[in-house]
Image (tube, grey):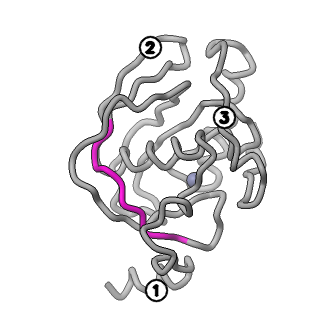
Amino acid sequence: MTPMAIAQLGEPILRQRANAVAEPTCAEIQTLWRRMLVTMEAAGGVGIAAPQVFQPVRLMIIASRPNARYPDAPQMDPVVLINPDIESTGGEAVAFVEGCLSVPGIRGKVTRPSEVTVRYTDTEGQPQRLALSGFPARIFLHEFDHLEGRTFLDQVDSPADLVAQSVWERQCQSA
Ligand SMILES: [Zn+2]
């Protein structure tokens, strides 16, 4: 399975609200999430939303794991969420510098709640409920934004907090 093309900032699909998946178990959706998983892994991402691969449907994957971009991320098996909804958010408001596969070269500080409880349909069509905290909660909220037609650039605390990837890497190393 080859990776899919990733929509880059400026593609209209990144600004559209995605549509509900009518049949989570249909062959099209089963193929889509598998291809998204391959695409995410090839790109070194920790999450991906269907609009990022030019599919305007409410489907996302979150997959926190340590990698070059996020060395301190907790390890988790990828979770495929179809038609996710936010039941509640809580915890503290935490600021963290985010990046995005659709926004190459730029990162920005975004404040988000540290906990989120979500409902979604799994790949077998079963309803699920999941409580997330810390980095996985952040990934979920970032990907959920994509389903709403938003990117992290809409959520940055201040445009003054945007930073080039190369500068951020240098700052991290000296921190
Ligand atoms: Zn993103």
The residue at the point 46 percent across, 86 percent down is 170
The residue at the point 75 percent across, 46 percent down is 13
The residue at the point 55 percent across, 19 percent down is 123
Real-space Cα separation, disc 1 to disc 2, in angstroms = 43 Å
Report the front residue among 49 and 1.
49
Q: Earlier in the sequence, mark 3 or mark 1?
A: 3
Say which of marks 3 and 2 sits in front.
Answer: 3
Amino acid on which the number 1 mark rests in the picture: Arg
Which element type, helix, strand or loop, lies under badge 3? loop
Chain part drawn in magenta: 107-116
Q: Is residue 41 left or right of residue 88?
A: right
Report crowding for label 1: few under 14, some 14 to 19, many 20 or more residues within 10 A (C-alpha): few
| Identity of the residue furthest to the left in this view | 91
Q: Earlier in the sequence, mark 3 or mark 2?
A: 3
Instruction: Indicate if the residue with disc 1 has its beta carbon within 8 Å of ligand 1.
Output: no
Q: Position of residue 42 (x, y in %)?
A: 65, 51
Q: Is residue 27 above or below residue 16?
A: above
Q: Which residue position is annotated with label 2?
A: 127
Real-space Cα separation, disc 3 to disc 2, in angstroms = 19 Å
Q: Which residue position is annotated with label 3?
A: 18
Amino acid on which the number 3 mark rests in the picture: Ala
Report the front residue among 108 and 70.
108
Say which of marks 1 and 2 sits in front.
Answer: 2
Assess whether residue 112 is covered by the magenta stretch.
Answer: yes
Q: Position of residue 115 (x, y in %)?
A: 28, 43
Q: Which residue position is annotated with label 1?
A: 170
Which element type, helix, strand or loop, lies under badge 2? strand
